[in-house]
Amino acid sequence: MDSWKRRTALYVVGLIGVMLGFTLVYDYGMSAFDGRPRTFLEALQVVVETFTTTGYGSDAKWESPEMLLLVTVMDLTGVVLIFLALPALLFPLFEEAISTNVPTTVKNDIEDHVVICRYTPRGETLVGELDAWGVDHVVVESDRERATDLYEDGHRVIHADPQSVEGLRNAGLADARALVADAADEVNTSIVLTAREVDDSVSTVSVVEEPDRERYHDLAGADHVVSPRRLLGESLAGKVTTSVSTAVGDTIEIGQDFDIAELPIHRGSDLVGRTLADSKIREESGVNVIGAWFQGEFESPPSPEAILDNGTVLLVAGREEQLQRLKDMTLSSVRQFGHGETVVVGYGEVGRTTARALDRAGIDYTVLDHEDKPGVDVVGDATEPDELRAAGIADARTVVLALSDDTDTEFATLVVGDLNPDVEIIARAEQTENVQKMYRAGADYVLSLATISGRMLASTILADEQVISMDEQVEIVRTAADKLAGQTLGQARVRARTGCTVVAVERNGDVITDVGPDVHVAEGDDLVVAGTDDSVDRFRAIFD
């Protein structure tokens, strides 16, 4: 709107100047060439009539060629200035009048919310996590078009500058539980400084793209500084070293020596190709399978007929020794780490973090990158077969694709799979929507930077909650479930009716973790239940 006002002002000033200029020339020409002098006002009237094509009054005919040429030029100039200017000036005004009116301030009824400064792909994951936990949020977006799109999509958003005191006050920062600065590094430090000026007591979380700039976010006053790329590199390396961990943070502790964890099934595991029912996971390891991700799609509970594949990630609950037994089952029966076995493709921040984690685990690796810099073993293009061969792809058991461009990652996945059909491909995706394409290209395991970043932010903000889902919220609750008293879990058909998994029973201060369909629920028992938000709601509605 401000730009439209400036254009309009310049246009009006220019139009007046042109018309006054033609008036003076017309006045002179009528005296010099036609011998019919006109007053200044009469000349101005003719110019206005010519520009607006409303008629010429008494001066409808000119005798000299000079005046005919002048009037012709005035006609053309009038058409250009009056009619061709309409799309640039009036049409935007009409569009502004009928377009969506994005709020510039939040209502007074919102409090204990999260202020999200700018909306990015990781912000989309964060919003999903906040919605799942019932935490209000407001997005502060300075780009009007982006703010309009978000508003029309149903988001609570205001059009304001997050670097301004007024913008953050309009977002209700004084009543918020936290602020997330999620723009460029320099902008984020400015947002944090502004937030400190508005209300120094509100917790601030700043996202840093370049980890070496983390200190400056601390100096700006950020309470928490998160580095998603570093976490992504560690997570990718974690899939190589096969550590038992959740994608964000450590395992979730339910009771003493009883955890919930994510475990990926690796290429070459005896579980690959078997159905969940045939896998005998519960019988052989003792864990409860709460859910599973099949090529990035979450199912809870998973179907007994679901086929387990390399890259399937199990969400399980059990004691430490049970989780260890299942971890052994998920590994390749012939997998032995050796020299040159792992190839890291891409040596940016994610690739460097992956390499450092592999160093700590004592795993040899080869690094391929397009730039010749310290730490790079082979310089080349990740999409060129010959250069991948030079990095040892043909003899590798695992390839970590840590490229920043999703298109390159997809193509490299196809090339690597063609060069070595038996290799395990662990890939990094920049955008969540490209995860499925990478699975279709042949990747065994894909981690999205946007997803893991959003979950990392949610885990930081929801410090009192347990955020463990990859792209869908899994909720863990303790409930009395009085209506279950006197029944076994199998008789009540808990899982079939609700989709929830009972992972533990608390009875007289003890935690019973060996929970199967024959477990009898006694009066006064508390159940630890895991499932998606909808399934937990169904459980409460039926059994509470």
Image (cartoon, helix red, strand yellow):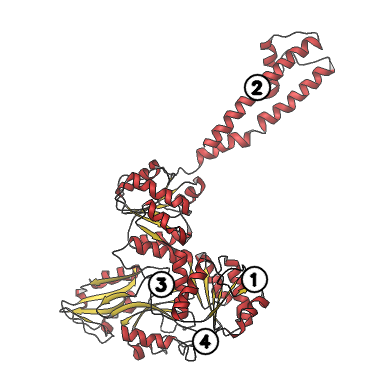
Give the residue type that dot 4 points to. Answer: Gly
Q: Which mark is residue 17?
A: 2
Can you identify the residue that label 4 sits on?
338
Q: Earlier in the sequence, mark 4 or mark 2?
A: 2
Q: Which part of the image, by quadrant, shows the C terminus?
A: bottom left
The residue depicted at 27 percent of the width and 81 percent of the height is 257
Q: CA distance from mark 4 to mark 1?
A: 25 Å
Give the residue type that dot 3 points to. Answer: Ala
Q: CA distance from mark 1 to mark 3?
A: 29 Å
Q: Earlier in the sequence, mark 3 or mark 4?
A: 3
Discs 4/1, front: 4
Q: CA distance from mark 1 to mark 2?
A: 60 Å
Q: Earlier in the sequence, mark 4 or mark 1?
A: 4
Q: Nearer the viewer, residue 17 or 356?
A: 356
* Residue 286 vertical placement versus 523 (above, below): below
Assign a secondary structure to mark 3.
loop
